[in-house]
Image (cartoon, helix red, strand yellow):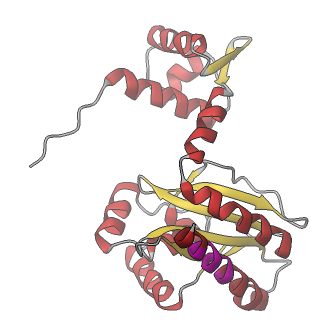
Amino acid sequence: MPDEPVKIESIEKITRILDALKELDHGGVTELSQYTGIPKSTMYYYLTTLERNEYVVKEGEKYALGLRFLELGEKAREHRELYDVVKPEVDNLADTTGEIASVLVEEHGRGVFLCIAAGERAVHIDSYLGQRVHLHTLALGKAILAHLPRDHVNEIVETHGLPKRTNLTITDEADLFNELEQIRQSGIAFGPGERLEGLHGVAAPIKAPDGDVAGAISVAGPSKRISEERFRNELRDLVLSAANVIELNATYN
């Protein structure tokens, strides 16, 4: 058996602190110590080091994530060749539908929003670039899962589980695999408010030139305003067309 990966305790603590700041928006030494279980004296040492290196900022007695992460995020996104190919299609899809268009990719078993565009009628939601989500909770994620190897999907489910976000979230493993099979056959995924109540999405996988799934593209909007018929027909066709254009551009660019 391969050796267990080495854990560097200081890096583990830093990631816990940064995750806490992301969840809390900001926090003082005591609050962050209680949230992470890291002793106050150690917490203060890490926070001052992070501040000195411009990764966090101090606002009074509170700390918050610094904008240096924005710079790093932009650089990381530039290295994903997919971004340059998908952005024009995501923008066009948002303009055409007036709704929210997005591209999601899988990384470490979670979905990561690579590109988001809002049309003129788009509702405000909590999604943002770089946000990590559970793949089973939205059409984008299911479109990706349906085209990943079964062993990889099993590993994702084992590692991250199937947590419930709304009453419509799939939390049963057998139900999930049944739906993934339907998505593979139809080439399209629907999400009837599984992550955010009232937000309906339709997504298609984006295949890489080698045939592997590279991500997924979707349109999402409020189910109260957009009819089921429009989701199943017009928006479905637009999403499939956008995915096809992206795949062709990725192949021949």
Q: In screen coordinates, is 149 left or right of 37?
A: left
Q: Is residue 167 visible?
A: no
The foreground one among 70 and 151 is 70
| Front-lying residue, 54 or 21 | 54
Query: Horizontal and vertical percent for residue 187?
Result: 53, 86
> What is the x, y in percent for residue 51?
60, 14
- What is the quadrant of the C terminus in the image? bottom right
| Relative depth, front residue between 105 and 77 | 77
**Vertical order, 65 against 217 (above or below):** above
Q: Residue 9: which quarter of the image?
A: top left
Identify which residue is drawn at 85% across, 65% down.
Answer: 119
Q: Position of residue 165 (x, y in %)?
A: 58, 61
Q: Residue at x 51, y 23 (%)?
A: 34
Task: Find out whether residue 246 is within the magenta segment.
Answer: yes
Q: Is residue 109 visible?
A: yes
**For residue 132, above or below residue 196:** above
Q: Residue at x 82, y 57 (%)?
A: 124
- Toward which corner of the image does residue 91 lie, by quadrant? bottom right
Looking at the image, is 15 positioned above or below residue 74? above
Q: Position of residue 78 (x, y in %)?
A: 59, 46
Residue range (magenta): 240-248
Which secondary structure class fits the magenta region best? Answer: helix
